[in-house]
Image (spheres, helix red, strand yellow):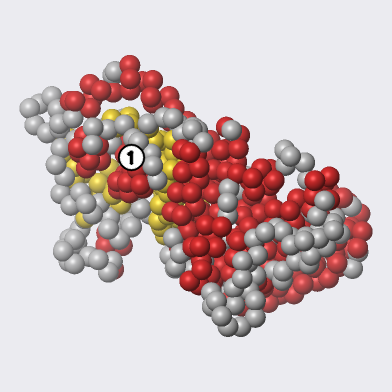
């Protein structure tokens, strides 16, 4: 049964908040900036209104998750800190003497209440509408880019992941008590998951037996993160690869296993749209969605600022139809001339390679034909034939018995004369200087809000993580500009 509980209950101790939580406190500012009742309205249909015991307020549960994203802590630690941190209690709408929830309630809330809700679009739309209402967004251009997030299961095996967690825990302990090294259990050197779990349990036991060390907040946080990973391992026995994550490429020689978040941002550094995909997806094909979502959220767009991945023929055509300038440098491999199956083969601008529909990247590239000889030059991309032989999508793509699989692009230098001329204009050169802003935003998401690695499996959970992180950075940016 759901009842609205957003407002502070009456308490003789509520006056403490005015004394302890200053006006400049971030959480107080967020509470004053935004009315969180829209969360209640969004999730109302996920609750029974007339049967069962009273449920915890969806607004409060959402705020717990927001605190997790702002401060990058575990479920256990955000609840524990809410027990004694008065700014947390104030933000959550609790009385000073009120007790906290059980941390397991947050998992249930994510799985039962937030599942199937388009939280990413909802939260971005809310912050953009606030920014427009406050007169913060004045620019008419969006900056676009994609940032990658490693899957929770990558790049470590289960044992490697546990060892990394236990290593961080030990290093934190030694910062406060270097002599504790003599009390540590012997490390497991075998490639045996059960033995590694036994070592982690013994490590946990010895640290918890020393209250002077265990109660240090930094140690406690690392210990709780290790416990969460141990629980996950106990449930699954092994960390299977994330079924929704895919291998993407940051360059021709480096790859990652995980997801991409494609972002659009105003020049005031407010994120106006986001699309989460698996890691192998190209950046350029997501531009139409980012543009449409930004416009739906109230942005007026007359320029798109990005890198070469966004200067594809279809994107230039779409922009021209809406009288929008594309401030993105042309790349002959994807923008000039006709190429077969261009809706199936994505160009990865970081690696300068094409990726086939199955997600395999070309292993090498060669240019054929001589420049200025009256004939078109062709870039030919070669794929790993052994992968093509067993690929489930090889029908109509790979001919049985063929000794190679290639994909060619015709280079026609005069196809985009208009865009090439635009690249030399003062307007283009001035607008392109703003692209660095989104790199800084990607860095903030990763380094401050833990967006460098997924905290759960599956693309739905990645979208939820993205929604909370982007909501947090947008609110912080709005408060700074106000």
Residue 366 in view of the camera: no
Residue at 31% over, 31% down:
302
Residue 462 left/right relative to 455:
left
Residue 480 in view of the camera: yes
Foreground residue among 59 and 208: 59
Residue 118: x and y in percent read 44, 60
Residue 264: x and y in percent read 41, 41
Quarter of the picture holding the C terminus: top right
Which image quadrant is residue 21 in?
top right
Which image quadrant is residue 4 in?
bottom right
Foreground residue among 182 and 234: 234
Residue extending furthest toward the left: 374
Which image quadrant is residue 96 in?
bottom right
Foreground residue among 143 and 208: 143
Residue at 67% over, 59% down:
7
Residue 292: x and y in percent read 32, 46
Residue at 49% over, 63% down:
42
Residue 106: x and y in percent read 63, 68
Residue at 40% over, 52% down:
275
Residue 130 left/right relative to 77:
left
Q: Which residue is mark 1?
A: 309
């Amino acid at each position: 049964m759901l009842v609205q509980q957003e407002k502070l209950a009456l308490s003789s101790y509520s006056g403490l908040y005015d004394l302890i939580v200053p006006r400049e406190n971030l959480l107080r500012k967020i509470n004053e900036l935004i009315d969180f009742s829209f969360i209640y309205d969004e999730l109302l249909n996920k609750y029974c209104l007339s049967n069962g015991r009273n449920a915890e307020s969806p607004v409060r549960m959402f705020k717990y998750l927001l605190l997790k994203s702002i401060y990058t802590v575990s479920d256990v630690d955000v609840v524990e800190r809410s027990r004694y941190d008065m700014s947390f209690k104030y933000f959550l709408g609790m009385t000073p003497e009120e007790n906290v929830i059980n941390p397991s309630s947050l998992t249930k809330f994510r799985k039962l209440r937030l599942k199937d809700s388009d939280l990413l679009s909802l939260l971005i739309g809310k912050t953009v509408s606030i920014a427009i209402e406050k007169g913060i967004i004045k620019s008419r251009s969006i900056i676009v880019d994609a940032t990658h997030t490693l899957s929770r299961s990558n790049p470590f095996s289960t044992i490697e992941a546990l060892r990394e967690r236990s290593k961080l825990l030990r290093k934190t302990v030694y910062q406060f008590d270097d002599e504790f090294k003599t009390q540590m259990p012997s490390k497991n050197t075998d490639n045996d998951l059960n033995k590694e779990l036994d070592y982690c349990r013994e490590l946990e036991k010895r640290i918890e037996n020393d209250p002077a060390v265990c109660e240090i907040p930094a140690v406690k946080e690392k210990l709780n993160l290790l416990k969460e990973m141990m629980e996950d391992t106990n449930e699954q026995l092994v960390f299977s690869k994330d079924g929704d994550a895919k291998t993407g490429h940051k360059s021709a020689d480096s790859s990652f296993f995980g997801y991409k978040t494609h972002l659009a941002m105003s020049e005031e550094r407010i994120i106006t749209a986001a699309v989460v995909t698996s890691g192998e997806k190209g950046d350029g094909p997501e531009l139409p969605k980012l543009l449409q979502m930004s416009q739906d959220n109230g942005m007026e767009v007359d320029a798109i600022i990005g890198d070469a991945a966004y200067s594809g023929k279809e994107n230039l055509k779409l922009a021209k139809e809406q009288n929008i300038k594309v401030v993105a440098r042309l790349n002959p491999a994807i923008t000039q001339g006709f190429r077969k199956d261009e809706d199936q083969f994505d160009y990865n601008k970081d690696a300068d390679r094409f990726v086939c529909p199955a997600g395999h990247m070309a292993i090498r590239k060669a240019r054929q034909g001589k420049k200025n000889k009256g004939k078109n030059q062709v870039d030919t991309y070669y794929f790993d034939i052994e992968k093509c032989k067993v690929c489930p999508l090889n029908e109509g793509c790979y001919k049985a018995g063929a000794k190679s699989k290639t994909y060619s692009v015709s280079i026609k230098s005069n196809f985009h004369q208009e865009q090439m001329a635009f690249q030399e204009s003062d307007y283009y050169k001035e607008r392109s200087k703003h692209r660095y802003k989104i790199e800084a935003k990607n860095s903030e998401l990763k380094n401050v809000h833990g967006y460098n690695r997924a905290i759960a499996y599956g693309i739905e959970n990645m979208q939820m993580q993205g929604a909370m992180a982007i909501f947090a950075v947008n609110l912080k940016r709005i408060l700074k500009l106000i």
